[in-house]
């Protein structure tokens, strides 16, 4: 189906893939934003490499299909050029929590004004079924047939301590909530991070597991750091616990772009005068 | 002259001031800086050489030794020429002839900090070399941005306490300013329209970062130090996609980390100017010493095949003008453009003619009102016009996969080959353009049928010896696309040639073999230090004559 936001590209995900739900929510959010004064030509998506990355092809929106794990520095360059552009990084859990994890932490540290959506299916799909940093302990993947020997880490906790100013969790089957979450995360001025529990029907189908445990966070204490910590720690991506969804934490803080505004362009005569000055100061 | 002391004594800045002093006397300058990889302590020295014509190497023998400690005299005494003079700190150096300066007394008298000891030794040297005080004062005022008056008082006391020994004649020719290669690269970037610079600290290019930060406000550029060279290069690619002229600088280890993104720039057709300052390897190697070990790495960096520009500057002046060329051609052809330099050029100093800037500027090709805009349109030239977001009604996609004209991923065999051909059409055009830019220099004795083949920092030393031994010198500046026409013309009449390189395997020789040129022999050095003039001359006399 080709429309103003879906491209003519063939969709190459498995039937039932959680990426369909995310795509639909992303489309809805971009349309909502367009109606609210963020024109869709100002939106740029930056995708990594993984099943999530195919979003680049199936969406009809400006995009940079980059490298595995490296969406965030590319987004930084785009934002430093033009702060009018709304940049959405579409990353995967292998793509963003394994390779390239440092960029996630530094994006949060700088409070770069971008949105990072992590399609967290907790398994490598494109390379057909290996464990990722959020796979549960003892996950039996193709590279760990007897089960992993490492515990997953908790991305929400990591982002909270790294300085992210908007943290949320979505679920690929809760399309409406996810759409609202994406819209809000894009509008938030600062580093917005959303971990999206994504169903992988082929290698890690946790639909029943998630359906039985998800609930919506109350958002009245969303600016309370300690409350954020408690919410982040409630489920550690391994043990059995209720799984909260929605906005977990947010706060206002000056962004990297605020502190590094785009200067006016240097005119050719000004450039020549500057070089002459550098030469004179020396000789 | 040689200036030595411990790390932290300000040997590098003393060398820069002496270089400017000689520059003010009409000399063409080369300065070599030698220091171990530590912040305090260890032996640092710098050698400044002045000559009537540009030089790019130092000699074994020196006329002056400026010693801030005993080690300097012990290590370098044998280098002093027959009529040479040692100017030394009386308090720390014993057992030497020459002119002693009581640095401690001077500093105490003026209540000046110990770090100003280098100003004392320079002041004394200026008197010993018969330089007038006005020139010393003028150079200090330009070279020392903070605390210049106290430094001048220190220098003056030392100047007055010394006596003239060897008058350094003033040459009757225009004076030229003296710059490090890193500064020259920074100037070239600014002249190339730089808007953002990204760098992760690494010798020998960290000073580009520092120089550009100093120019940040006036040049209206932004300078960033991200978390790694991977972030450095990808931020620059994000800038390129959105229309900002960004550049990056690094050395071998950092360049290794950049290679995946260089390959990305190749297929996504994004402009990417890279400054690669070589140092000794493999791996951490000798972190503060030199080598020309990364030529083939630069030529082949990144997986897959894609067009690129690789240029090797031979001195500060070439570093400046070719950096601008790299910026311009990266943008015109939407390719990675690598400027190779090395420690000798980056941290060494050279005289630089302020007016010798490239004014043959190439412009990027921008889209005009095409709808729908196709980022990878099959232009005849291979250069698809650029458009930057936001553009109403258009979708602007760049892609690391094989892609269709609209940027959407494809696995189609015809498109795969079609896009590859499109990219290589750019390379053919780039090669034509390069051939018109004097990409291969002929120096030394240009009529000789025996030639030295060199590149980068080998330029001036080969020229100097070539002149003396009647050898032609051929210095290709552009190495990819290889300027076959320019090289053939430079080699016209050459019956035998010898490679001169500071690496283990003769990398330029290996490159020209691909085009049918076989060297008779090679003279290589790979101990981290540059060739000294006497040393290279002796080795060439053995091999060539």
Image (cartoon, rainbow, N blue to C red):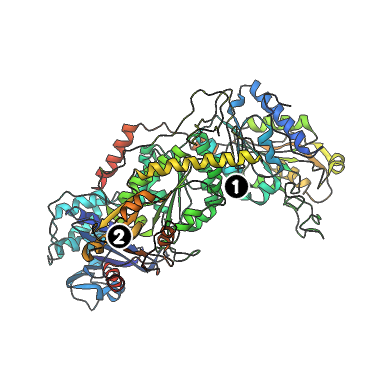
Q: Numbered disc 2: what chain? A: B
Q: Position of residue B112 (x, y in %)?
A: 27, 59
Secondary structure under tag 1 reads helix
Report whether A71 appears left or right of A210. Answer: left
The image quadrant where one finds the C terminus of chain B is: bottom left
Would residue B106 be found to the left or right of residue B478 on screen?
left
Total number of numbered discs in the rendering: 2
**Front label number (1 vs 2):** 2
Viewer-closest of B345 and A167: B345
Question: Element under label 2?
Answer: loop
> Quick check: B277 above or below B271?
below
Please report the residue visible at 55 percent of the width from the left and 25 percent of the height from the top: B391
User: Picture quarter containing residue B499?
Assistant: bottom left
Q: Is residue B228 visible?
A: no
Image location of residue B134, percent across then percent down: 15, 52
The residue that disc 1 covers is: A103
Q: Position of residue B532 (x, y in %)?
A: 29, 67
Q: Nearer the viewer, residue B42 or B322?
A: B322
Q: Left or right? Give the position of A56 relative to B258.
A: right
Residue holding disc 2: B494
Same-chain check, marks 1 and 2: no
Q: Position of residue B331 (x, y in %)?
A: 45, 38
Residue B195 visible, this orientation: yes
Which quadrant would the N terminus of chain B be assigned to in this image?
bottom left
Q: Residues within 10 Å of mark 2 (few under 14, many from 20)?
A: some
């Amino acid at each position: 189906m080709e429309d103003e936001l879906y491209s003519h590209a063939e969709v190459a995900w498995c039937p039932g893939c959680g990426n369909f739900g995310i795509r639909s929510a992303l489309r809805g959010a971009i349309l909502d934003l367009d109606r609210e004064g963020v024109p869709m030509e100002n939106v740029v998506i930056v995708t990594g490499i993984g099943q999530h990355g195919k979003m680049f092809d199936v969406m009809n929106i400006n995009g940079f299909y980059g490298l595995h794990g490296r969406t965030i520095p590319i987004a930084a360059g785009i934002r430093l050029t033009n702060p009018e552009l709304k940049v959405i990084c579409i990353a995967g859990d292998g793509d963003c929590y394994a390779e390239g994890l440092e960029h996630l932490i530094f994006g949060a540290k700088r409070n770069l004004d971008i949105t990072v959506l992590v399609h967290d299916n907790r398994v490598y799909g494109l390379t057909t079924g290996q464990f990722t940093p959020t796979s549960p302990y003892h996950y039996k993947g193709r590279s760990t047939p007897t089960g992993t020997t490492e515990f997953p880490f908790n991305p929400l906790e990591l982002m909270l301590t790294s300085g992210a100013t908007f943290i949320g969790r979505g679920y690929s089957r809760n399309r409406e909530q996810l759409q609202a979450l994406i819209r809000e995360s894009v509008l938030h001025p600062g580093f917005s991070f959303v971990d999206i529990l994504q169903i992988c029907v082929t290698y890690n189908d946790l639909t029943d597991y998630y359906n039985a445990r998800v609930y919506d966070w109350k958002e009245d204490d969303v600016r309370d750091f300690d409350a954020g910590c408690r919410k982040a720690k409630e489920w550690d991506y391994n043990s059995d616990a209720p799984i909260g969804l929605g906005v977990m934490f947010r706060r206002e803080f000056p962004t990297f772009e605020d502190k590094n505004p785009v200067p006016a362009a240097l005119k050719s005569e000004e450039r020549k005068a500057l070089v002459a000055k550098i030469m004179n100061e020396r000789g | 002259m040689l200036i030595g002391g411990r790390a932290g004594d300000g040997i590098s800045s003393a060398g820069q001031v002496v270089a400017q002093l000689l520059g003010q006397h009409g000399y063409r300058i080369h300065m070599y800086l030698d220091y171990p990889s530590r912040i305090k302590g260890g032996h640092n020295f710098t050698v400044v050489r002045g000559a009537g014509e540009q030089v790019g190497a130092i000699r074994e023998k020196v006329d002056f030794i400026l010693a801030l400690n005993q080690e300097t005299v012990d290590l370098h005494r044998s280098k002093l020429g027959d009529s040479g003079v040692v100017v030394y700190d009386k308090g720390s150096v014993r057992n030497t002839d020459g002119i002693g300066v009581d640095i401690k007394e001077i500093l105490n008298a003026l209540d000046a900090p110990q770090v100003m000891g280098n100003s004392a030794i320079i002041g004394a040297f200026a008197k010993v070399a018969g330089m007038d005080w006005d020139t010393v004062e003028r150079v200090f005022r330009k070279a020392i941005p903070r605390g210049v008056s106290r430094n001048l008082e220190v220098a003056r006391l030392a100047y007055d306490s010394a006596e003239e020994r060897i008058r350094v004649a003033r040459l009757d020719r225009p004076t030229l300013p003296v710059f490090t290669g890193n500064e020259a690269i920074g100037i070239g970037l600014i002249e190339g329209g730089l808007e953002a610079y990204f760098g992760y600290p690494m010798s020998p290019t960290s000073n580009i970062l520092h120089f550009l930060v100093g120019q940040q406000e006036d040049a209206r550029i932004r300078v960033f130090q991200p978390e790694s060279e991977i972030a450095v290069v990808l931020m620059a690619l994000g800038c390129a996609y959105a229309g900002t002229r960004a550049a990056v600088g690094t050395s071998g280890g950092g360049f290794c980390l950049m290679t995946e993104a260089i390959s990305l720039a190749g297929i996504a057709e994004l402009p990417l100017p890279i400054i690669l300052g070589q140092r000794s390897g493999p791996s951490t190697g000798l972190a503060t010493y030199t080598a020309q070990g990364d030529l083939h790495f630069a030529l082949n960096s990144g997986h897959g095949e894609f067009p690129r520009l690789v240029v090797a500057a031979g001195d500060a002046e070439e570093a400046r003008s070719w950096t601008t060329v790299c910026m311009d051609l990266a943008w015109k052809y939407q390719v990675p453009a690598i400027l190779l330099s090395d420690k000798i050029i980056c941290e060494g100093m050279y005289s630089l003619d302020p007016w010798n800037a490239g004014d043959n500027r190439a412009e990027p090709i921008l889209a005009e009102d095409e709808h729908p805009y196709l980022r990878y349109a099959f232009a005849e030239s291979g250069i698809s016009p650029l458009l930057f977001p936001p553009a109403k009604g258009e979708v602007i996609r760049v892609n690391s996969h094989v892609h269709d004209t609209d940027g959407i991923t494809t696995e189609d065999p015809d498109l795969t080959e079609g896009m590859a051909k499109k990219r290589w059409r750019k390379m053919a055009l780039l090669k034509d353009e390069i051939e018109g830019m004097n990409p291969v220099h002929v120096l030394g004795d240009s009529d000789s049928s025996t030639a030295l083949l060199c590149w980068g920092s080998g330029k001036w030393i080969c020229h100097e010896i070539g002149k003396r031994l009647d050898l032609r010198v051929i210095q290709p500046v552009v190495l990819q696309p290889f300027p076959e026409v320019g090289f053939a013309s430079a080699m016209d009449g050459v019956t035998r040639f010898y490679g001169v390189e500071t690496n283990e395997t003769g990398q330029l020789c290996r490159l020209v073999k691909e085009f049918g040129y076989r060297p008779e022999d090679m003279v290589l050095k790979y101990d981290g230090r540059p060739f000294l003039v006497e040393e290279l001359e002796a080795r060439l006399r053995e091999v060539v004559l």
